[in-house]
Image (spheres, rainbow, N blue to C red):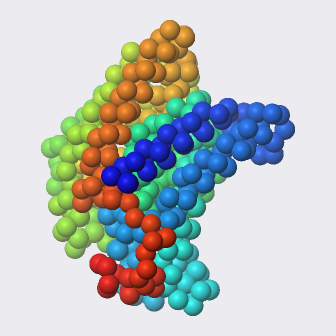
């Protein structure tokens, strides 16, 4: 129960503080006007509200122990399955310390991940407060307690999305390559994001539909192609058989797509960023619905549907006051229900970010594998 109350308090504080931020063309520093000062103070406060609980956690997350072992393997050059950026950070920190203090590694990744997400949301969102609300309500922040490599990559890709929209393709490519140093699946957005910058005509939409249907029919052939691209999964039967349909993500994509279609002409049609996010959401729907057999499908899907935390606020921003007020209430209610469902699922083995524990009251060993042997 402590963890549930804590997560609700973190979310409320984050949303309240984020509501004070007003975007000024994505520039938070240096401060010039009064609002710029408010932005700096609010963004800094938001960072610490999100960073501190993440840095203080222990034994919270479905792969916490697994990551301690991965830290050890990267440091000792055992059989390494993790990416070079991740390995480099581990080796540098552990070599400097002369021992395996895993808590510091988790804190470093928490620092970088929270920083990347806040920067990305600030650069892209038309309503920072609503974007942070959705970021918390969808459980995205608390999911960063799991799979720390992946969520750092996702935060970096959120920043890369800004440059893809602006047409700064060199910066976009460099950021994607940086993200791939922490999770190799990040390279797929080198195709997805530029593709969503293109103009979609009826023929292209029809081809996307056919492509989606082909995923349902030619599952084995697509898996064989995937294994050619990622041969490291050839003997990973557990991962190859773990794919399952994510009905929650499918329903979320459908709901957002319905919202987009309804407000397409008055809000989205002439707004290039919103068109981009809408296309990403459509790709996410095709991917979740037709390619759920792909290993780590949910992770690839999040590279696409992360756009929802930008798309929904963008639609609200473009409405007249009456419609905006009505739809905001609906979004807030839906977000609260979704968050409650996430907290309920957070105790399960799939998510397992509850119960929350902190190392402040832990009296055992803090040294790498010794901690795993005692508590694992």
Residue 125 visible from this viewpoint:
no
Q: Which residue appears farthest toward the right when viewing the image?
A: 32
* For residue 339, side relative to residue 12 (left or right): left
**Which residue is at the front of the view, 375 or 335?**
375
In this rendering, position of residue 266 left or right of residue 374: right
Q: Where is residue 211 in the image (x, y as percent from the top left)?
A: 27, 39
Residue 112 image-quadrant placement: bottom right
The quadrant the C terminus occupies is bottom left
> In the rendered view, would you say 86 is above or below 167?
below
Rendered view: 77 above or below 39:
below
Q: Position of residue 253 (x, y in %)?
A: 33, 33
Which residue sits at x=58%, y=80%?
Answer: 93
- In the image, is residue 371 above or below residue 173? below
Query: In the picture shown, does residue 90 fall above or below 188?
Result: below
**Residue at (23, 71) in percent of width and height:** 236
The structure residue drawn at horizontal position 45% and vertical position 71%, both measured from the top left corner, is 361
How many numbered marks have been drawn onto this rendered protein structure? Answer: 0
- Quarter holding residue 148: bottom left
Q: How far across and down, in percent of the image, does residue 240 sit? A: 21, 62
> Which image quadrant for residue 224?
bottom left
Residue at the (73%, 44%) spot, across then down? 40
- The answer to whether residue 141 is seen in the rendering is yes
Residue 39, x across and y down, in percent: 71, 39
């Amino acid at each position: 129960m402590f963890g549930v109350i804590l997560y609700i308090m973190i979310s409320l504080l984050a949303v309240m503080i984020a509501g004070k931020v007003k975007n000024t063309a994505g520039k938070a520093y240096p401060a010039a006007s009064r609002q710029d000062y408010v932005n700096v103070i609010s963004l800094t406060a938001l960072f610490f509200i999100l960073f501190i609980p993440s840095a203080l956690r222990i034994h919270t997350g479905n792969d916490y122990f697994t990551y301690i072992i991965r830290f050890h393997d990267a440091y000792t050059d055992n059989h390494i399955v993790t990416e070079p950026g991740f390995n480099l950070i581990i080796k540098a920190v552990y070599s400097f310390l002369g021992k395996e203090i895993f808590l510091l590694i988790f804190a470093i990744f928490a620092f970088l991940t929270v920083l990347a997400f806040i920067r990305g949301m600030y650069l892209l969102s038309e309503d920072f407060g609503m974007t942070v609300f959705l970021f918390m309500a969808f459980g995205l922040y608390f999911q960063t307690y799991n799979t720390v490599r992946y969520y750092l990559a996702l935060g970096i890709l959120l920043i890369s999305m800004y440059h893809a929209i602006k047409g700064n393709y060199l910066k976009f490519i460099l950021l994607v390559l940086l993200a791939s140093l922490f999770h190799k699946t990040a390279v797929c957005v080198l195709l997805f994001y530029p593709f969503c910058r293109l103009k979609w005509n009826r023929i292209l939409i029809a081809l996307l539909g056919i492509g989606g249907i082909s995923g349902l029919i030619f599952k084995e052939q697509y898996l064989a192609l995937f294994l050619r691209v990622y041969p490291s999964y050839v003997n990973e039967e557990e991962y190859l058989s773990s794919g399952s349909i994510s009905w929650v993500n499918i329903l979320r994509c459908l709901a957002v797509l319905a919202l987009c279609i309804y407000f397409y002409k008055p809000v989205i049609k002439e707004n290039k960023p919103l068109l981009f996010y809408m296309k990403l959401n459509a790709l996410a729907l095709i991917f979740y619905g037709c390619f759920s057999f792909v290993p780590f499908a949910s992770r690839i899907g999040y590279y696409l549907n992360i756009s929802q935390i930008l798309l929904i606020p963008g639609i609200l921003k473009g409405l007249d006051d009456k419609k905006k007020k009505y739809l905001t209430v609906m979004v807030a209610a839906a977000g609260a229900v979704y968050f409650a469902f996430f907290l309920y699922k957070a105790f399960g083995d799939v998510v397992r970010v509850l119960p929350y524990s902190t190392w402040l009251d832990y009296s055992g060993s803090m040294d790498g594998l010794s901690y795993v042997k005692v508590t694992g």
